[in-house]
Amino acid sequence: MVSKKPRIVIIGAGMAGLTAANKLHTASSTKELFELLVVEGGTRIGGRINTSEFCGDRIELGATWIHGIGGSPVYKIAQEISSLESEQPWECMDGNLEEPLTIAEGGYDLNPSFVESISSLFKNLMDLAQGKVINEDCEIVARLKQAAAKSAGDLSVGSFLQQGLDAYWSLTKDEKLAVNGFGNWSGKSLQEAIFAMHEYTQRTYTSADNLHSLDYNAESEYKMFPGEEITIAKGYLSVIQSLVSVLPAGLIQLGRKVVKIEWQLETKKNGEITNGWPVKLHFSDGSTMYADHVIVTVSLGVLKQGIQHDSGLFSPPLPSFKTGAISRLGYGVVDKLFLQLSNSDDDQEINGCNTKFPFLQMVFHQTDSNLRHPKIPWWIRRTASISPIYSNSRVLLSWFAGKEALQLESLNDEDILNGVSTTVSNLLSHNLCNSAGIPQPKFDKVLRTKWGTDPLFLGSYSYVAVGSSGDDLDTLAEPLPKTGTTCSDSLSSSSPLQILFAGEATHRTHYSTTHGAYFSGLREANRLLKHYNCIVV
């Protein structure tokens, strides 16, 4: 074989792919050990990170939060490049807004203490599911621990939460469920709806369409960094740009969508597909490229699509242990909806009433469809809140998940504006400001994300579904072929490490996050550096 530099091709210019490229380049640039290339199917870098602007404010169409600053590599990079401060306003710049205004369908303003009792219950239940220490003497906790211990290993977060709510009701005195002056709402139906409101928020955290599909046992494996959760003032994309800044021009190729990856399931007589290369990439424009190693960082949604038929992404098809993990793991859709308040709704005070749009929590009827307002669209009913992106912004934000998110993607702007206006009008119909004769809020512009129907992503992020486990995340991270561990300065006859996998869905404890994607890119870069006897840092 003619001596050559190993060629490493990274598929995808998101956090995982660019972290791997950054590491491989900086660790070997002085020796020029590799021929390195990043191919990206889209027209931009960043993947599921996409900083943009809307009505003068900086917003995030994709990843939004640094989930805990203690130990987060994303926070460290943002801090090093001075991206945590900006003169331009940005999304969630002041963290959590003031206390929410919680209003039930029909315009009924709920007492914060009434809401807090159910909110606290939900939080405690999620803490218990996530393995956090809570009051062991609580009777509800004791009951739930017994129930979880008796489950056959297929307990869902949704069923666990329902058991917790049922246990709460069984221990609650009837008088605590009595309410007056709330139209067709009973105390129990209000509590059920408030509880559901928090479930809807949890859906956006996990991307699960229904929490009954979210595995209970995996919740305690998921890890959060300590410290506050913040957004990046100069935009999440600034972190991506920092990773790219050290890479030479031409290393990243945009508009290069891979449609097939040929690899060697078994060693052939000549040990390669052709001309000394074990992997062959086919692109959508008909061109091809050869490589020694390919790091695949496409989303789990693209992998799911890629294993659905014989003419899928991989040839030969991936082995069953890999396809099984891909099939079992969950992957959902989370979309963001931004709306601009009309100029007539700028902050003003009339008769001592401040008309600034509140942090509005929305409580909708759950079980009895006859009690529901007929003009509130179904795709809003499993949405928890709508609020300004920071205290004085005229830009509002609402989060959608699952089938409601997919419906949002299919609607035209007028339908969205009408649906939100109808819902907000219903909820604020009895509000003090509106009883003073102040017009209902109106909206001028709308911007929504479309992660579910974007063919480069087909969703937002992964979760451990019922029937899956953290083991499947580890399996997804395993390189192919599974055999062949010889480390040398040249390819061994078995051509090891042909296909490596990175991305948030390959990290057991930090899946669904940008830092999980970062760690996975670092992991695969270090795997290759170790293979070629380079020092792993």
Image (cartoon, grey):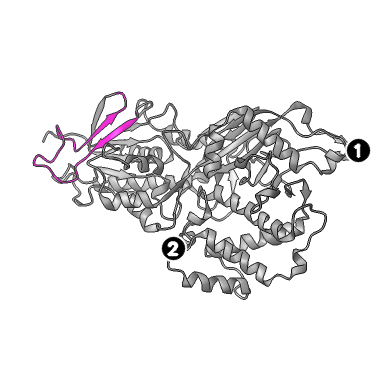
Of the residues shown, which amino acid type is indicated by label 1? Answer: Asn
Of the residues shown, which amino acid type is indicated by label 2? Answer: Asp
> In terms of image quadrants, where is residue 115?
bottom right
Secondary element at image label 2: loop
- Mark 1 near mark 2, Cβ–Cβ under 8 Å? no
For disc 1, the marked residue is 351
Secondary element at image label 1: loop
Specify few, some or many for label 2: CA neighbours under 10 Å numbering under 14, 14-19, or 20 or more: some
Q: Residue at x 28, y 53 (%)?
A: 321
> In terms of image quadrants, where is residue 249?
top left
Q: Nearer the viewer, residue 98 or 155?
A: 155
Q: Which residues are magenta?
A: 257-285
> In terms of image quadrants, where is residue 5?
top left
Picture coordinates of residue 146, whole percent (x, y):
52, 74
| Left or right: 95 as drawn, with respect to 47 | right
Q: Main secondary structure of the magenta part?
A: loop
Determine which of the numbered discs, if any, sits on residue 244 in the image.
none
Q: Residue at x 25, y 43 (%)?
A: 317
- Say whether residue 272 is magenta: yes
Picture coordinates of residue 413, whole percent (x, y):
61, 28
| Residue 338 in view in this figure | yes
Height in image: 494 above or below 243? below
Q: Earlier in the sequence, mark 1 or mark 2?
A: 2
**Cα distance in 3D space between marks 1 and 2:** 57 Å
Q: Residue at x 67, y 41 (%)?
A: 386
| Residue 79 in view in this figure | no
Furthest residue in direction left, as rendered: 269
Height in image: 374 above or below 470? above
| Left or right: 269 as drawn, with respect to 110 | left
Determine which of the numbered discs, if any, sits on residue 154 in the image.
2
Q: Nearer the viewer, residue 15 or 30?
A: 15
